[in-house]
Image (spheres, coloured by chain):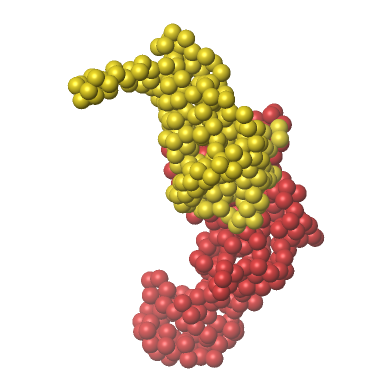
Chain colours: A red, B yellow
Amino acid sequence: MSAAVRATGLTKSYGKKVVLDSLDLEVEEGSIFGFLGPNGAGKTTTLRLTTGLARATTGSIEVLGHDAQAAGNAIRSAIGFLPDVPAFYEWMTAPEFLFFVGGLFGMARTTLHERTDMLLDLAGLTDVTTKIGGYSRGMKQRLGIAQALINAPRLLLLDEPTSALDPMGRKDVLDMVASLRGRTTVFFSTHILSDVERVCDTVAILDTGRLVAHAPIDELKARYGKEKVVVEVTDHADDLAKAFGERPWATAVARGALGSIEITVTDLGAAQHDIPAIVAARGSGLARLEAGEISLEEVFVELVGGER
Amino acid sequence: MNAALVFARKEALEIVRTWRIWVLPAIILFFAITAPLLARFTPEIVGAVAGDQLGGISLPPGTSLDSYGQWIKNLSQITLFALIIIYGGIISAETSSGTAILVLTKPMSRTAFVVVKAVIHSVFLAVLAVVGALVTWALTAAVFGSAAPGPVWSSTLVWLVLGVFYIALMTFFSALIPSAAGAAGAGMGAFVLLAIAALWKPLSDHSPAGLAGQAAALAAGKAVPDLLWPVLVSLAAAVGLIVAAALLFRRKEL
């Protein structure tokens, strides 16, 4: 499968400050790609370079087979872009704005009418007649997503698309993103890990301008996650947590909700064998022993949160 | 429809639907209405205020040419200041607010973005100048009984060339300087420099520096034989400034 986005040695610096450091990245066409990283990691900078709004210091970035720094309209006519804080002409109404951006793509009037009606419905703005200046942040975010889809883009670039939305709005956007699977490549920057887990096939994690992971989500969890065991005991939870931490198969122990003990393990079988014996030896009772899958959040924290 | 035309329509609609439809038209219409009235009644007003202090000196009655002179003087000073302030953000207002990002990630070139703005606002200024001249001419005729059309139209058209030059200058400064206030400051600086340059005749005769004086001379009914040079140089400079603004804006990171 060909790459919708391919960055090679992509570096962006402002004076001595390097915000993106030799990024190598490939986003497969048709995939839903989650681009994760803490604030200041370089996610928005990568998107600005992808859309041609900024120029790379060194390295290159190809979008749909074209050099993003030089191609101009060849790329812009095939992408949809939602910036992190979309800004609109506040004197326009939502239909006027969608007509305006659709006009920039040279869309025929009848097609534009159909797309506008469909996207206003998707954004929940069909019956809103006020000017955009009176919209809430969530309404603007939804309109931003609608305008990014006006041209039925081959590549949809979304910078933090769900950050200003309420739970229902988030669900609608994630459902919409999921519905594009296989038809449109979605490049989805966010710090909301549950959103990525829900809709993305592949994920890249960026930290202080460097790529620290790039793989399908399942592979990433398998690679970094090891496994996790959640234990609930009747007594002596603190002593037992300490005892579990001393075993060779335990790499980390943490106290979870309601007094549970969460143990990250390297050998699940050994842990399941040893834990009941340790609990019994301390005169406690085993209320729950559950082998759990490590979440993307835990992978993320392990990769970028260690020294924070 | 071509993206540049769609954007031009947006710019025109923005003028009609925002504060832009009130500020510059109000300033120009105010001067168009007050110029004939001030020219007609200034001698009476001065006489009434000064009383006997003029010592028997009687001020000559106002003429239609005084009315035109007042109109052009106000255009060349206060209206140009207004243009400089209003258009300090002609480009940077869109880049700083973020609206330019949504437009320029569509198939719309940065060059077209700059050129369309300069052209649409120049056309807007031309419409206002024509309407203003028409009002001045009609009111002058009403107040003074007769009004020759030549001086008011020729002087207004020469001023319009200067106005278009200033819009191009502000487009350049606004592409160069991210802050609207900073660009307006640079525009004021350019205004002062041009006023000083107008004192040197060779420059005054061959550049925008002399246009205000030449417009004033036309409004006074005087002949200005070498008008073509400063007009052509000013228009060429306006085109050059817009091209420079487009080149600057193409290299700018948003």
User: Image point 47% across, 34% down: which residue?
Assistant: B76
User: Image point 71% across, 32% down: which residue?
Assistant: B1
Asked if residue A98 is positioned above or below residue A265 in the image, the reply reads: above
Front residue of this view, candidates A260 and B45:
B45
Front residue of this view, candidates A299 and A191:
A191
Asked if residue B157 is positioned above or below residue B58 in the image, the reply reads: below
Tell me residue A16's x, y (percent).
56, 74
Task: Pick out the residue farthest to the top.
Answer: B145
Task: Pick out the residue farthest to the right.
Answer: A1
- Quadrant in which the N terminus of chain A is drawn: bottom right
User: Image point 65% across, 45% down: which residue?
Assistant: B240
Residue A169 visible, this angle: no
Asked if residue B197 is positioned above or below residue A210 in the image, the reply reads: above
Where, by quadrant of the figure, is residue B31 drawn?
top left
Where, by quadrant of the figure, is residue B208 drawn?
top right
Tell me residue B125's x, y (percent).
54, 30
Residue A3 visible, this angle: yes
Tell me residue A169's x, y (percent).
50, 47
User: Image point 38% across, 20% down: which residue?
Assistant: B39
